[in-house]
């Protein structure tokens, strides 16, 4: 007697097909965005819809190298190290069985390199069509970096608004151009800008280890981001103090060796727009700018464009004075606001009719800037010039860093050694938690859990080189092993993570199956074939 048995092949095929769909849904809801890009490092941050391991695959034109995320939840920030300065990299995010479309970015050049291209704009975070047009125009310009002048997420800088009004409309731009942002008054509406700080990964080289104000070098330009809300009394003393920020700024500007200095923040010291000049910023910071040779100040707040003449103190700079031009670049996407009065004598040009961004190229001793509208018109252009000394040839060889104690439990002590390319070079360290040191061999103790990017800088004359490493510190009581070095990210879960990655510009931008995921439908076809053979 022949027994006829049955096997539930059809439910199995259906289950395998569903697995493929679940994997695709897990890649969103936020596209990868670039943070803290330097000469040899970059942070790729992203949000997933499901808790799963993730990795960034990257390389020069390929994606053969892999950096695993230290996190296993939905919030990820993967630090890439050992990159080459001034080099274009291609990258993808591989998570939840799917891979994002390939994106590309360029690392910062070797410090001191005399060619820099950046864009700047503020007051864009509406989520509207004008913002999207400005973002698209900036991406078409292919800048090396983008500095944001505040009011990046209207109307209150909440978690949901940062997603819908910053990351979604600017997803394509932020996935290929690193963002260095400053706080606007609208970000301060929600817990004094805390959601902004939770969602961005910015430099934190001030004594408070805060991302509210910071500085960084890109080529031969020294950039400084200030928190003007702090200066005008919107911040509580435990978040930001005017005197501390001002003292830090003086030390920072005095210490830089780069010939060009650009400062950016939200509230303008000079403006004839609706809000007008913010005198607290002018009185507290303009003397510092002037003392330490700041070349250009970029601000927002008023929803228009305006450029001042070179200013010194409360007046136009005299013939024997060095003045600073102050710009308002507030046409990033919010509704434009008309100027109510006649143009004052200190104002060179102003416009309240077009959205656009500032495109700046700094080559050797010339800074050339232009205001570009969304339809490609140039409404204003100007140049600044200075004499630079002959450029020294970079030393042969590279700076290398070794770490003893890359992983540990707080409080965790790590030892760092640097081998500079030239003997006798000055080596300074930024430990990523606000601490710093000087010397080729140093040690540092991390008091709190976290993933820290350590930066060593070697200086010989005007030549600088940097190298980075990562230290992962777990909380006390958390076991640490080479297989599981992860430290949970304390940044809050994004509201609305149930959004499908198949829709919206910030929902993953589409995805393709990873090699492992591709096996699932293939297995389904194999089982289906067995069903057909069994029925014959």
Image: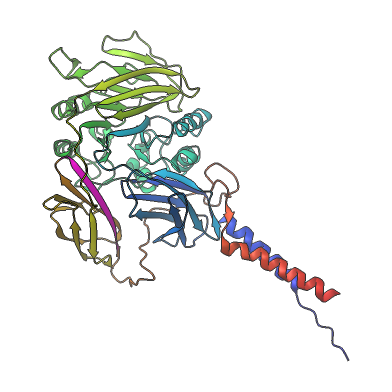
Residue 155 occupies quadrant: top left
Question: Along the line of sight, which residue is nearer the eye, 58 or 243?
Answer: 58
Residue at image coords 22%, 22%: 324
Question: Along the line of sight, which residue is nearer the eye, 85 or 33?
Answer: 85
In this picture, residue 312 sits left or right of residue 80: left
Residue 202 is situated, as x and y percent measured from the top left of the image, at 32, 45
Q: Report if residue 267 is visible in the image.
A: no
Would you place residue 14 above or below residue 393 in this image? below
Residue 467 is situated, as x and y percent measured from the top left of the image, at 26, 52
Residue 472 occupies quadrant: bottom left
Would you place residue 180 above or below residue 353 in this image? below
Question: Along the line of sight, which residue is nearer the eye, 190 or 135?
Answer: 135
Look at the image and give the residue range highlighted in magenta: 462-472
Would you place residue 534 above or below residue 13 in this image? below
Q: Report if residue 307 is visible in the image.
A: yes
Residue at the farthest right position: 1
């Amino acid at each position: 007697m022949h027994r006829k048995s049955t096997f539930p092949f059809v439910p199995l095929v259906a289950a395998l097909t569903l697995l493929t769909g679940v994997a695709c849904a897990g890649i969103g809801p936020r596209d990868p965005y670039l943070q803290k890009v330097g000469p040899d490092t970059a942070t790729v941050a992203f949000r997933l819809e499901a808790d799963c391991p993730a990795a960034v695959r990257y390389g020069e034109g390929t994606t053969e190298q892999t950096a695993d995320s230290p996190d296993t939840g939905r919030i990820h920030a993967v630090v890439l190290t050992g990159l080459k300065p001034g080099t274009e990299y291609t990258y993808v995010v591989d998570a939840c069985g799917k891979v994002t479309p390939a994106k590309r970015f360029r690392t910062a050049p070797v410090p001191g390199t005399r060619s820099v291209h950046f864009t700047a704009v503020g007051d864009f975070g509406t989520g509207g069509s004008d913002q999207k047009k400005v973002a698209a125009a900036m991406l078409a310009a292919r800048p090396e970096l983008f500095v944001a002048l505040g009011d990046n997420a209207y109307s209150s800088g909440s978690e949901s608004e940062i997603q819908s009004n910053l990351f979604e409309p600017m997803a394509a731009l932020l996935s290929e151009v690193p963002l260095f942002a400053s706080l606007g008054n609208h970000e301060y509406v929600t817990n004094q800008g805390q959601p902004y700080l939770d969602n961005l990964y910015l430099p934190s080289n001030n004594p408070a280890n805060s991302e509210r104000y910071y500085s960084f070098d890109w080529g031969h330009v020294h950039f400084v981001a200030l928190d003007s809300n702090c200066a005008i009394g919107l911040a509580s003393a435990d978040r930001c103090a005017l005197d501390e920020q001002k003292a830090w700024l003086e030390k920072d500007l005095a210490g830089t060796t780069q010939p060009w200095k650009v400062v950016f923040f939200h509230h303008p010291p000079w403006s004839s727009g609706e809000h007008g000049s913010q005198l607290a910023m002018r009185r507290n910071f303009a003397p510092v700018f002037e003392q330490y040779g700041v070349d250009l100040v970029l601000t927002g707040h008023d929803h228009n464009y305006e450029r001042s003449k070179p200013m010194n103190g409360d007046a136009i700079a005299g013939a024997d004075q060095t003045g600073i031009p102050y710009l308002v670049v507030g046409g990033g996407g919010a509704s434009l606001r008309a100027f109510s009065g006649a143009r004052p004598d200190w104002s060179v040009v102003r416009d309240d009719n077009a959205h656009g961004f500032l495109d700046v190229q700094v080559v050797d001793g010339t800074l050339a800037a232009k205001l570009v509208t969304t339809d490609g018109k140039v409404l204003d252009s100007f140049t600044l010039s200075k004499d630079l000394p002959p450029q020294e040839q970079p030393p042969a060889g590279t700076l290398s860093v070794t770490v003893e104690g890359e992983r540990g439990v707080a409080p965790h002590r790590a030892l760092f050694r640097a081998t500079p390319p030239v003997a006798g070079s000055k080596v300074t360290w930024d430990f990523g938690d606000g601490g710093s040191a000087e010397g080729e061999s140093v040690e540092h103790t991390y008091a709190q859990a976290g993933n820290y990017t350590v930066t060593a800088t070697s200086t010989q004359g005007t030549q600088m080189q940097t190298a980075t490493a990562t230290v992962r510190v777990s909380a006390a009581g958390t076991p640490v092993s080479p297989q599981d070095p992860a430290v949970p990210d304390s940044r809050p879960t994004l509201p609305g993570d149930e959004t499908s990655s198949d829709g919206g510009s910030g929902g993953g931008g589409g995805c393709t199956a990873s090699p492992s995921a591709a096996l699932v439908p293939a297995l389904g076809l194999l089982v289906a074939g067995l069903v057909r053979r069994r029925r014959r």
